[in-house]
Amino acid sequence: MEPPRLSLQEYEALVEQSPILIWRANTEALCDYFNDRWLSFRGRSMEQEHGNGWAEGVHPDDFDRCLKIFLDNFNSRQVFEMEYRLMRYDGVYRWIFDRGVPFSDANGEFAGFIGSCVDVTERVEAQEALRKNLELEIKSLKGIIPICSYCKKIRNDKESWQQLEEYISAHSDALFSHGICPTCLEEQIKNIETLKHK
C-alpha cells in the first residue's frame, strides 16, 4: 500500500516549521525566499532579506569567501557546502553550515538553487577549543629540554652538549649577566680557606 501524498498545506508546514533554515535563489543568483525559521533566526522580514539583503548578516571576515563559493558553484550549477558566521536576531554571530543544490522547474529547466542551513556553533567552538588544547600540549612537549643532572649542560639538536647560557642564547633573545648566589659564595669561600691551609 502506497503512503498517502502530502497536501500542499502539509508541505508548507514542513518547509516553514522545519528545524533548519531554508533559502531559495532564482536564476540571477538573487534570493527570493526564506522560510519562517530563517526569518526568525535573523529577526528580519522577507523584504529585508530578499535579493542580497541576507548577505548583510554575514560576518565581514567570511563575506568574500562565502560570496565566491556561492557564485562559483551557482555559475557551474554544482552542489556546494560552506561554513560562515551569520548574525542572529540578537546581534550574535553564529556559525552556519550551508548546503546549496541546483533545482529545476516543471519543464526540467534550471530554476536556481535551494539551500538548507544548520547552526553548528557548538561544534565549531568545541573543535577550536580542542585545537588550542593540542597546541598547548605540543608547545609544552617542545619545551622539554634534555639537561645533565650533574653539570647542567644541555644536549642540543646535534646531540652535543652545550653550556646552559650558550644553549639559551642560541634559542632566544635572552642576555646573561653573571653573578654568584649567597650559597655558592659561601661554598667558594670555604674552598679558598681550605686551599689556604694546605
Image (tube, rainbow, N blue to C red):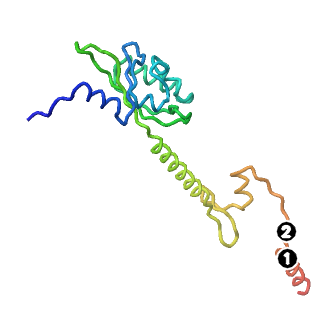
Taking the view exactly as shown, the residue that stands out farthest to the right is 196
Q: CA distance from mark 1 to mark 2?
A: 10 Å
In percent of width and height, residue 50 lies at: 45, 18
Taking the view exactly as shown, the residue that stands out farthest to the front is 9
Query: Given the image, on which type of amino acid does mark 1 rest?
Result: Gln
11 versus 144 height, above or below? above
Give the mark, 1 or 2, whose residue is nearer the N terminus.
Answer: 2
Q: Quadrant of the N terminus?
A: top left
Q: Is residue 104 left or right of residue 127?
A: left
In percent of width and height, residue 122 lies at: 47, 45
- Foreground residue among 72 and 160: 72
> Do the CB atoms of the residues marked 1 and 2 lie less than 8 Å apart?
yes
- Residue at 42% x, 20% y is 72
Q: Residues within 10 Å of mark 1 (few under 14, many from 20)?
A: few
The quadrant in which residue 148 appears is bottom right
Query: Given the image, on which type of amino acid does mark 2 rest?
Result: Ile
In percent of width and height, residue 135 lies at: 55, 50
User: How many numbered marks does the figure carry?
Assistant: 2
- Residue at 55% x, 49% y is 132
Mark 1 sits on what residue? Answer: 188
- Residue at 11% x, 33% y is 2
Q: Is residue 179 left or right of residue 82?
A: right
Mark 2 sits on what residue? Answer: 180
In percent of width and height, residue 67 lies at: 48, 22
- Element type at mark 1: helix
Taking the view exactly as shown, the residue that stands out farthest to the bottom is 197
